[in-house]
Image (spheres, grey):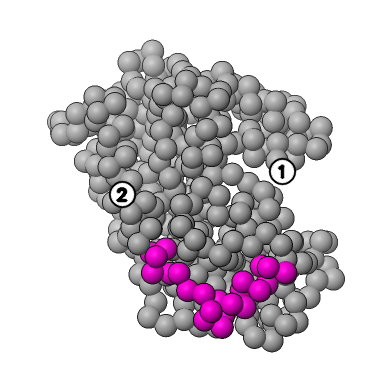
Amino acid sequence: MSNTSSILFVTQISLFPTYGGEKIRSLGLINLFSDMGMSVNAIIGNSLSEYPTNLSPNIIFHEFDFLRKKNYFSKASDYFIIDKKLKELIVSIIQVKKISLVFLDYGFLGQYILFFKSLGIPVLYGTHNSQANLIKQVDGHTFRGKLNFTLASFHEKFYFNKSDYIISVSQIDLNYHSKISVASKNILLPNFVSEKEYFPSESKSNYVIFSANFNTIQSLNGLIWFLNEVWDEELSLITELYLAGNYSKEALDIPQLKDVYLKNVKALGSVSDLKSIIAKAKVSVVPLIEGSGTRLKCVEAMALKTQIVSTDVGAEGIEHKGSILIANTSSLFKKSIIDVLNNNFDMTDIAHKIFFDKYSSRSNLNILSDVVQNKLKIKIC
């Protein structure tokens, strides 16, 4: 039997196909643990496509149907009740493989912490944003949103401290989590992508890219703002706008965009090679008006040397040193896009260096390795 230390990674996300920030982060974390020298058993949501061929052989995926209750009041149990079938799957894995560490990633899985701790297995709780705070931002004005916020907030306050460490993606999120849990338990591990998979293009094409999962309320609201307030005839005469990502085609049919100017706006849907589309774009826009965490679309554009124009919220948590053009009004956002198209602003070389130093797999492997080996004292064989 191998002496390699093993980790059980649990996420409700369906990782394949890997589009959207949440999927990229979760798969990136799994790959980091593998690169560290650990064998990985990953429980993931049911996949919608075949697995990539370049995955490490020491990663085993177990798909699970994370059913969410449709009745809004009964779904409150999702925050606190252990799923018997999921627990059975977990037990079946533990019986075959000695697990040194558990990483609970995304969603509300804190109710499983005490089960693992009873077996003497340390637990890392991975966050993608300050979830309760995000719910309050985007839906806190409705009764359903207030109920959801209350449940999420209670879950975080009750369970976070029961884990060994909490992983946050930005300093803002870390500060938020430190207020509801022991500050020393909070670790910053920013969003990242693998430098081995991102290659800048030698030439740029005349289009603007907005890549996102448009099925999320923050991306959809950002799209509504951008198309209503920024995109107009002047921009359409000098460039094209590409919308790429899940639900991008369907998003253009929503009532809020019924009478919007859409000339030279092209929705690409979920594309298989988003990296090349971002790499060839002249501008990558992140026109978000709400949200938390750090946007992987920013990290990807930095890695691919595509100039970013963003709101403050869109660039939140990114230490970009002025390499991202920040614009919080529609007029300034439009002017910033035109400046980049006219080659009056280009900070992509600086952004690319920042990517390597802070948002690459290489730089974040050291952070995660320190948590596992030095803080948790887990020996990596």
Q: Amino acid at mark 2?
A: Ser
- Residue of label 1: 138
Secondary structure type for disc 1: helix
Percent position of residue 105, x then y: 46, 36
Q: Quadrant of residue 122?
A: top left
If the image is split into quadrants, where does the C terminus sit?
top left
Viewer-proximal residue among 199 and 185: 185
| 38 is higher (above) or lower (below) than 204 | above
Residue at left offset 75%, top offset 36%: 140
Residue at left offset 51%, top offset 27%: 178
Q: State the extent of the magenta-drawn residues as a range.
A: 331-352
Magenta residue check for 272: no
If the image is split into quadrants, where does the N terminus sit?
top left
Viewer-proximal residue among 47 and 111: 111
Q: Closer to the camera: disc 1 or disc 2?
A: 2
| Distance Cα–Cα, label 1 vs label 2 | 32 Å
Percent position of residue 363, x then y: 31, 49
Viewer-proximal residue among 305 and 265: 305
Q: Quadrant of residue 190?
A: top left
Secondary structure type for disc 2: helix
Q: Tell me if I can see residue 64 in this picture.
A: no
Magenta residue check for 334: yes
Percent position of residue 18, x then y: 46, 56
| 210 is higher (above) or lower (below) than 93 | below
Percent position of residue 355, x then y: 38, 58
Mark seen at residue 363: 2
Q: Amino acid at mark 1?
A: Val
Instruction: Identify the mark nearer the N-term, 1 or 2.
Output: 1
Quick check: 4 left or right of 291? left
